Image (tube, rainbow, N blue to C red):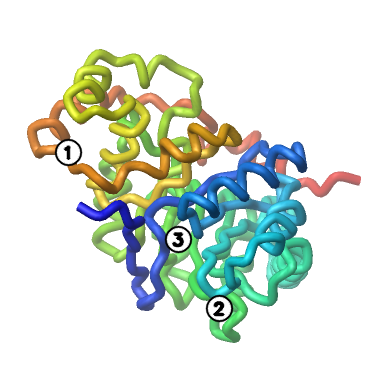
């Protein structure tokens, strides 16, 4: 099997690399620049950021410093909660373009389902129709959010970026998304290091069997499920390791073994946490 990164196709025919580099919490400019350089060197072309990460400008400079043409890169950013609303979203989108130093995005997401997300989506539909965004989607949306959005707008989200890992496989939401041709994208695909997921005996046994690390086994589990993954790392060796998951496959039996790790446990914030959604919808003065 070749070690090429797979592509997944959106409902509109646009493709997204199944593996990307997430840059959440990467604020040290030198560290991020080096992480992007290494990622590009080993074949990453998909990079996931957001306005609230405060690193769009650094990511843009790092990509510009490479010789990789813009058209072969896949850039994702997200509109934050206090920028929701029709005109607000358009302004936030342009600000992200300016910071990234590009004139279009490959993917733009609503970061959380806070107030006014329908008006936000309508602005994104217009930007998409105008060719400013190749694909549009959401992040941290539950089934009821998706149903509400689809009932009031024209374009079904093309992707939903949600917390997903073997302890929290999101099976019900995943099935709903599949029914509506919404691609499943995982953030925190390795559990964000907040737990003992990567030390589970099942994963360690499979790592030994396949000659891989436990992290590579988990990432491959996502790949086998058709999920887009954006593991975060600033460590060059880890960036390379996370890239090296396309030269093997997990058997059905081994996929079933990993399924036994499902505990239904979220390791991060809940999409229906109204206190969080309300607090983060207030623009800082």
Furthest residue in direction left, as rendered: 253
Q: Secondary structure at mark 2?
A: helix
Q: What residue is shown at x 51% (from left), y 75% (from top)?
A: 134
Query: Is the residue marked by circle 2 packed among few (<14), some (14-19), or many (20+) residues within 10 Å?
Result: many
- Which residue corresponds to mark 3? 148
| Mark 3 or mark 2: whose residue is earlier in sequence | 2
Res 131 quadrant in image: bottom right
| Mark 3 or mark 1: whose residue is earlier in sequence | 3
| Percent x, y of residue 239 | 50, 39
- Residue 213 position (above or below residue 29): above
| Percent x, y of residue 255 | 16, 35
Q: Is residue 214 visible?
A: yes
Q: What residue is shown at x 72% (from left), y 68% (from top)?
A: 97
Q: What residue is shown at x 76% (from left), y 56% (from top)?
A: 57
Q: Is residue 281 visible?
A: no
3D distance between C-alphas at marks 1 and 2: 37 Å
- Which residue corresponds to mark 2? 128
């Amino acid at each position: 099997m070749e070690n090429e990164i797979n592509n997944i196709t959106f409902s509109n025919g646009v493709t997204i690399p199944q593996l990307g580099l997430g840059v959440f919490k990467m604020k040290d400019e030198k560290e991020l620049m080096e992480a992007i350089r290494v990622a590009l060197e080993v074949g990453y072309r998909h990079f996931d950021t957001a306005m609230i990460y405060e690193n769009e400008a650094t990511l843009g400079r790092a990509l510009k410093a490479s010789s990789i043409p813009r058209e072969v890169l896949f850039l994702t950013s997200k509109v934050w909660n206090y920028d929701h609303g029709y005109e607000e979203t358009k302004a936030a989108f342009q600000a992200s373009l300016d910071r990234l130093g590009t004139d279009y995005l490959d993917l733009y997401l609503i970061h959380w389902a806070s107030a006014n997300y329908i008006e936000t989506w309508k602005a994104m539909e217009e930007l998409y129709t105008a060719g400013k965004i190749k694909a549009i989607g959401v992040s941290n949306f539950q089934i009821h959010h998706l149903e509400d959005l689809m009932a009031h707008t024209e374009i079904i989200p093309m992707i939903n970026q949600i917390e997903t890992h073997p302890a929290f496989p999101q099976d019900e939401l995943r099935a709903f998304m599949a029914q509506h041709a919404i691609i499943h994208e995982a953030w925190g695909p390795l559990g964000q290091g907040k737990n003992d997921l990567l030390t589970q005996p099942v994963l360690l046994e499979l790592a030994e069997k396949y000659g891989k690390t436990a992290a590579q086994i988990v990432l491959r589990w996502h790949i086998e499920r058709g999920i887009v993954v954006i593991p975060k790392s600033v460590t060059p060796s880890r960036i390379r390791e996370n890239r090296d998951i396309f030269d093997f496959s997990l058997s059905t039996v081994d996929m079933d073994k990993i399924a036994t790790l499902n505990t239904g446990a979220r390791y991060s914030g809940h999409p229906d946490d109204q206190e969080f959604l309300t607090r983060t919808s207030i623009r800082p003065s």
